Amino acid sequence: MTFCATVNAIIHAGALPILADVDAVAMNIDQAQVEAKITSITKAFCRFTSQGRPCDMDALCEIARRHNLLKSVLMRL
């Protein structure tokens, strides 16, 4: 499972990973959960695709823009 490596990289960088679940229909990151988990100390979020299913990058970039989060972490892993 790739999520272990992603979470470990976040921890080793000194950050605290907060996980969001997937949308049961799209089987990819749930944008509503991502936005609900953003707090005043959130700096960035990282997403990755699963089983070749692309997530809604437009929606995630809009969330990042609204909350002034780093877009550089919005990458395909």
Image (cartoon, grey):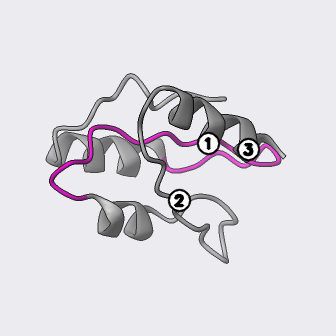
Q: Which amino acid does label 1 sit on?
A: Val
Q: Which of 9 and 71 is in front in this view?
A: 9
Horizontal side, residue 2 vs residue 11: left or right: right
Q: Which amino acid does label 3 sit on?
A: Cys
Horizontal side, residue 37 vs residue 20: left or right: left
Secondary structure beneath label 2: loop
Task: Please rate how many residues cluster around mark 3, counting C-alpha atoms within 10 Å: few if below 14, some from 14 to 19, many from 20.
Answer: few
User: In the rendered structure, are the residues bearing label 1 and label 3 in contact, judged by CB atoms less than 8 Å apart?
Assistant: yes
Is 40 magenta? The answer is yes
On the image, numbered disc 1 is attached to which residue?
7
Distance CA(mark 3)–CA(mark 2): 11 Å
* Quadrant including the C terminus: top right
Horizontal side, residue 53 vs residue 62: left or right: right
Q: Main secondary structure of the magenta part?
A: loop
On the image, numbered disc 2 is attached to which residue?
19
Distance CA(mark 1)–CA(mark 3): 5 Å
Q: What residue type is labelled 2?
A: Leu
On the image, numbered disc 3 is attached to which residue?
4
- The vertical placement of 73 against 3, above or below, is above
Specify the farthest residue to the top: 72
Horizontal side, residue 32 vs residue 47: left or right: left
Secondary structure beneath label 1: helix
